[in-house]
Every structure is written in structure tokens, then in C-alpha cells.
């Protein structure tokens, strides 16, 4: 490639939309997800236009607090993503509501497909994320505050107060995906071999087995929401 073509490529790169944007751009007004289709695309297949209704764009599930009483670490995520709102397909956005019991923890996790911006509805949360340089960026936030968790970075939220707390998060993906660090490593199916975990965490097999038995599939199911 000649010098001038290289320069042209570089200039093109500068004017193109950033490659790191989240979900791909839409190619039509709407593409309401056909959640029952077996056709696999980068997203969901579109329903026939004739069967689209306002219900495809509506969800009441964030209006009421989630019940945190029987959860392992005192928090419950209610997702409002494309799986709940089929009209979100191809639009690149979604919400979730998180309710926290006093002391409740949304354990360290990442969203591989989205940046998250959280708004505190009620209460006080200790929140933070970790950069790839292992720097922790953390803050205590309270009702009305906003905090950002950049795409792909491990983050957490803990209700440090003595009363319940709640937050709403927006994501730049119709389906951000969630990988919770502890359950990803200790409750995978098939399981991550003990020798991988003993070496990674510098602990013994007994400790690994103990953690695995505590993070049984129940917890993995609780976290598989986004
Ligand atoms: C909160 O971090 C969430 O992922 O909903
Ligand atoms: Mn999150």
C-alpha cells in the first residue's frame, strides 16, 4: 500500500463512527424481536409487521420493587431488555432496576456488551469499578446521583445503609449480558477444573470445593438476567 493510500485509510478511520460503539446500527425503523424464531442473527429475527402492537414496546416490570427476601446476597435485578420488550431489538438500549435489602450486594460482575449508567432511586450505595490497570474507581452515591460503569469493566454495588435501596440502570445494548465473577468461575457448567482455580486463587482444593458448593446453580440462575 502506497503512502497516499495509507493516509486515505487513516483519514477514513478518523471520520468513521467509532468501532467501539455498542450494538450495531439499525437498518430499518423497527425490527420487533420474534423471540420464538429459531433463526439466529446478531440479534433476533423481526416479527411480521402485521403482528406488531404497542405491547411490543411496553413493560411495567420496573414500577414495583423486586423482592430481595430469598436472594443469596440481598439484591434482585429486574431487567427491561429485549427479552422483555421485543421492540428493543436492534435499538441498542435497555434498562434494569436493582433492589437492595439493607446490606445487600450486587457482586462484582461485567457487561461484555454495554456501558452502564446507574441512577439511584432510593437509599445509599457504595459503587465502584476496576480498570484493566487494576485501579479501583469507587464512590458512595445516594438518591438522585448518577454513576457510570464503563463497558466490560468489573463493577459492584453495595447497599451500605440500614434501609432498602433501589437504582435504575441504562445500557447501550438491547441485551448487555452479565458475567458475575464468582459464579462464572465457581458455578460454571461443566465446572472449571479445581486445579485451575487452586492455582489462580492460590488456595487448596477443599476451599475451591467449598466455594463451588455455596455458589450452586441457584445463585447462577439468580444472576442470569441481563
Ligand atoms: C447493575 O449493575 C446491573 O447490572 O443491573
Ligand atoms: Mn452492572
Image: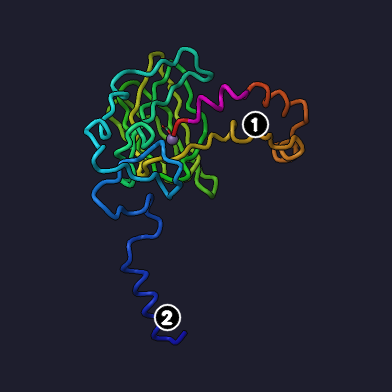
Question: Can you tell which mark lies on residue 102?
Answer: none
Task: Indicate the secondary structure of the residue bearing disc 2.
Answer: helix
| C-alpha span from label 1 to label 2 | 47 Å
Q: Residue furthest left?
A: 54
Q: Position of residue 177 (x, y in %)?
A: 46, 39
Label 1 CB-ligand 2 distance < 8 A: no
Query: In this picture, is 126 found above or below 135?
Result: above
Query: Do the residues under discs 1 and 2 have CB atoms within 8 angstroms?
Result: no
Task: Indicate the secondary structure of the residue bearing disc 1.
Answer: helix
| SS majority, magenta | helix
Of the image marks 1 and 2, the number of the one nearer the N terminus? 2
- Boundaries of the magenta span: 215-224
The quadrant in which residue 215 appears is: top right
Q: Position of residue 48 (x, y in %)?
A: 29, 43
Q: Position of residue 97 (x, y in %)?
A: 36, 27
Query: In this picture, is 156 found above or below 7?
Result: above
Residue for point 49% across, 39% down = 110
The quadrant in which residue 34 appears is: top left
Q: Is residue 221 magenta?
A: yes
Label 2 CB-ligand 2 distance < 8 A: no
Please give the residue where the numbered disc 1 appears in the rendered image.
186
Residue for point 42% across, 80% down = 6
Q: Position of residue 94 (x, y in %)?
A: 34, 38
Query: In this picture, is 99 found above or below 53?
Result: above
The crowd level at tag 1 (other Cα within 10 Å; few <14, some 14-19, many 20+) is many
In depth, the one of 74 and 113 nearer the eye is 113
Residue for point 38% across, 80% down = 7
In the image: residue 131, left or right of residue 169: right
Please give the residue where the numbered disc 2 appears in the rendered image.
6
Residue for point 50% across, 17% down = 71
Q: Quadrant of the C terminus?
A: top left
Amino acid at each position: 500500500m502506497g503512502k497516499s493510500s495509507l493516509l486515505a485509510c487513516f483519514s477514513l478511520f478518523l471520520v468513521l463512527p467509532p468501532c467501539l460503539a455498542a450494538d450495531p446500527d439499525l437498518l430499518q425503523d423497527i425490527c420487533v424481536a420474534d423471540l420464538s424464531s429459531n433463526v439466529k442473527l446478531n440479534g433476533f429475527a423481526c416479527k411480521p409487521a402485521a403482528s406488531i402492537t404497542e405491547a411490543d414496546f411496553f413493560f411495567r416490570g420496573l414500577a414495583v420493587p423486586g423482592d430481595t427476601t430469598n436472594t443469596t446476597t440481598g439484591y434482585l435485578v429486574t431487567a427491561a431488555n429485549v427479552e422483555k420488550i421485543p421492540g428493543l431489538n436492534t435499538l441498542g438500549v435497555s434498562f434494569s432496576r436493582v433492589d437492595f435489602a439493607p446490606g445487600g450486594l450486587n457482586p462484582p460482575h461485567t457487561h461484555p456488551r454495554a456501558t452502564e449508567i446507574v441512577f439511584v432511586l432510593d437509599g445509599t450505595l457504595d459503587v465502584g469499578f476496576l480498570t484493566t490497570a487494576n485501579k479501583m474507581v469507587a464512590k458512595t452515591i445516594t438518591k438522585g446521583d448518577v454513576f457510570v460503569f464503563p463497558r466490560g469493566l468489573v463493577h459492584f454495588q453495595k447497599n451500605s445503609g440500614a434501609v432498602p435501596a433501589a437504582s435504575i440502570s441504562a445500557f447501550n445494548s438491547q441485551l448487555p449480558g452479565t458475567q458475575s465473577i464468582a459464579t462464572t468461575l465457581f458455578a460454571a457448567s461443566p465446572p472449571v477444573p479445581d486445579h485451575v482455580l487452586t492455582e489462580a486463587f492460590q488456595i487448596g482444593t477443599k476451599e475451591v470445593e467449598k466455594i463451588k458448593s455455596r455458589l450452586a446453580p441457584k445463585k447462577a440462575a439468580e444472576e442470569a438476567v441481563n
